[in-house]
Structures are given as structure tokens and as C-alpha cells.
Amino acid sequence: MSAELERIEIAVVDDEIARLRHRSFRLPLLLLAAIAVAGVIWKLRQPIDPPVATRPNTAVPVVLATATQVDVSDHVAGIGTVQASATATVRVRVDGQLQQISFIEGQDVQAGDVLAQLDPRALQAQLATAEAQLARGQATLENSRVDLQRYAGLVEQKSIAKQTLDTQKALVAQHEAALRADEAGVEYARVQLDYATIRAPIGGRTGVRLIDVGNLARASEATAIVVINQIDPITLSFTLPEATFARVNDALKRSKSLRVQAFSNDGNQPLAEGKLLLVNNQIDAASGTIQLKAEFPNQEHRLWPGQYINARLVLGETRAALVVPASAVQRGPEGTFVYVVNGDDTVSLSNVKVARTQDDKALISSGLQAGQRVVAEGQSKLRPGSAVIARAGPAP
């Protein structure tokens, strides 16, 4: 009986061992299968690259420009302030109460136009007094001259002493001098009366009225009635760097009259064109600049006193200059160069010589021909042989 139980126990143990061995083989196989499936899924999700031979070349987007031949002015630029050609501060020249204002603020007036009127009665009385004094002097002189003629006849008759005649001659001369003083007094009174009518000393544009009707105006006070600015023509005072003086001086030797162009403060809008009046007789050592003055016709009043504008002094003109945008010119170890666009829309490097840079233009003296396309913007990603494609950008 014990032997039989022993055989049964041994059989049970063998079955358990077989079952465990089967389970131990299944677990690694399941793990390997899971790993394989995950790898296949990851591979399927990756983008499929085309063969290297069939990949297209990536074109670099750039802004293109064409080398053109145009007439370019040679000029130097500075900043200036518009000034009135003439300024007159209108004040009273005699004391009096302001009776009338005859102008409107901001009105254009001509020289001699009546601007204001003072109460003239006191001045008229002074003139009347001076005229009466003159009349009395004339009568006194006339009487002295009649006495002189009478004394002359009596001296011939030896009725009176010659000394009496000489005394009368001196008296006539004295009365003549007094009469001239009276005449001057009348003229002075007339001038004073004329000052009661205040007239425009120059033609121009009136400003703000600085005194009102009814106020007492005094010649000794600094209060003005109005300020008149002459704005047609108008002047511009501007400065240039000291380094440009030699070019300006050479241009003045070639032409006595140089053109000056006025542009808006941002430099984009042309306002007027005039002529150079003055190159100052010394350079400002403190600022290293030289002062110039130009005059502009200003019928449309596009320039205004106190306005800050950009000024361009035209020194000459270069005919049929080959120009490209200044941004197209790059600098490398061997000098300046541009990227030229070939017929197949690839670029090649071309060394160029720049005569000068004027505003946003570069004048090319060699290394480029008219009609060639160049890269104006986007050079940082280019190499010789790179393909390019035109993109929108600011007009070169």
C-alpha cells in the first residue's frame, strides 16, 4: 500500500514539473512577439524618404533686382531749418490809445498796408501848433526884410548910420534861421502824426495779434502789435559735415549756382527746389560742420518758418550710371561682390567695384552689366550654385 502511494505522488510531481516547464517557455515567446509587433508599427509610422537621386533641390526665396543705367545726381545731404526771408516786429513809435486794428491774423499783407490806427488828436494839435509857429516866423521874417530894404535906402541918403543897416541884416538872418527851425518843427509834427497810422514795413504773412483795441500803446514798451514773416520767397539754413566741404567747393568752382532740394522730415516727399545763396565763411570747430543757406520760391507755402526738413545740395550729375540697390552689394575677403542670378535660376558670385553709394543706390563701375539680375535681399543663405526663387519684398 505504501509503495502504491509513493508511485502516485511521484506521478503528480512529474506532471507539475512538466506544466511549469511549458509555462516558462511561453512567457519569453510572448514577450518577443510583442516587441516585434511594436517595432513593425513604429516603422510603418515613419515618413518614407524618396531616393536621394529623386529629391528636388530646395530654392532659397530672395528679393531680386535688375542692374539699370540711369542718370544719378551727386549730392550731399543735411538737416536744416526753414526761416522767413525777412521778419518785422511791428511796434508803435508814438504813444497813443489803439483805436482800430485793420488786419486779420494770418493775413497776407503788402508793404505799406495799414495795420492799425492810434488816436491822432493830440498829434494833430501838435501839428497845428507847429504850423502856427511857422506862420508867425514867416511874418516876422517878412517884416525884417522890409525894414532891411528901407534901411538900405536911408543909408544911401546918409540919413542913418551904416551900423543900423548891418544890425538889420543880422536880424533878418536870425529870423531866417528861426523860420527854418519852425519848418523843421512842422515836419516833425507831421511825421509824428503819420506814426499814428501803423503800416506794414514789409510784405508777408501776419501772425497772432499781440494787442487789442482800446489799450494804451507806448513807444517805450517792448509790446508789439504783430510780427510779419516774409515766406515767399523763403530761406533754409542747413549744415553739412566738414568732410564734404572740398566737394562743395569744387562744385562751386564749376558752377556758381547750385541746386538745393528740400524733402520732408522722413526724406520721402519732395517739397521744393531752390538755389544755394551762401556757404558760411568759416567751419564750426565745435560741431565740425559748415553752415549753408538756400532760397526757395514758396508760392504754395509748402515750406514754413521753423520747419525741420532734409536738404540735398546737388553737386553734379552722373549720366547713364549703372546702379543696383545698395543692399545687393556684399563685402567679402576679396572686396565687394554681388550674387548674379543665372538663366537657370542659380546664383554665381561676381566681384564688383562700387564708385560710390548714393542714398539707397550703389553705382557700379565694373563687374556688372546692365540688365543682369542680382539678389537684393536674402544673401545670408546663399552659396555659389544655390537655386533661388523670387519672393515679394520692398521695391529696390
Image (cartoon, rainbow, N blue to C red):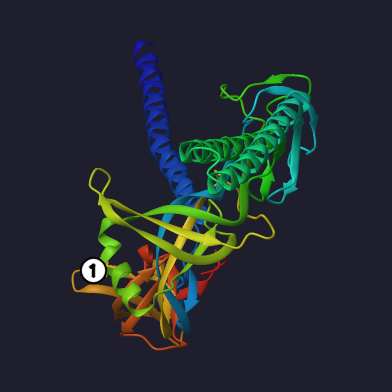
Q: Is residue 25 left or right of residue 249?
A: right
Q: Nearer the viewer, residue 221 or 194?
A: 194
Q: Residue furthest front?
A: 158
Q: Is residue 379 visible?
A: yes
* Residue depicted at x 30% and y 77%: 355
Circle 1 SS class: strand
Q: Residue at x 26, y 53 (%)?
A: 283
Q: Quadrant of residue 354?
A: bottom left
Count of number-bearing discs: 1
Q: Residue furthest left?
A: 333
Quarter of the image with the N terminus in it: top left
Percent of width and height locating residue 97: 74, 21
Looking at the image, is 129 positioned above or below residue 153?
above
Q: Image quarter for residue 172?
A: top right
Instruction: Decide: few, some or many residues near mark 1? Use Cα within 10 Å; few <14, some 14-19, many ≥20.
Output: few
Task: Give whichever of 363, 303 is nearer the camera.
Answer: 303
Observer-nearest residue: 294 or 151? 151
Instruction: Answer above or below: position of 252 versus 11.
Output: below
Whether residue 56 appears in this view of the structure is no
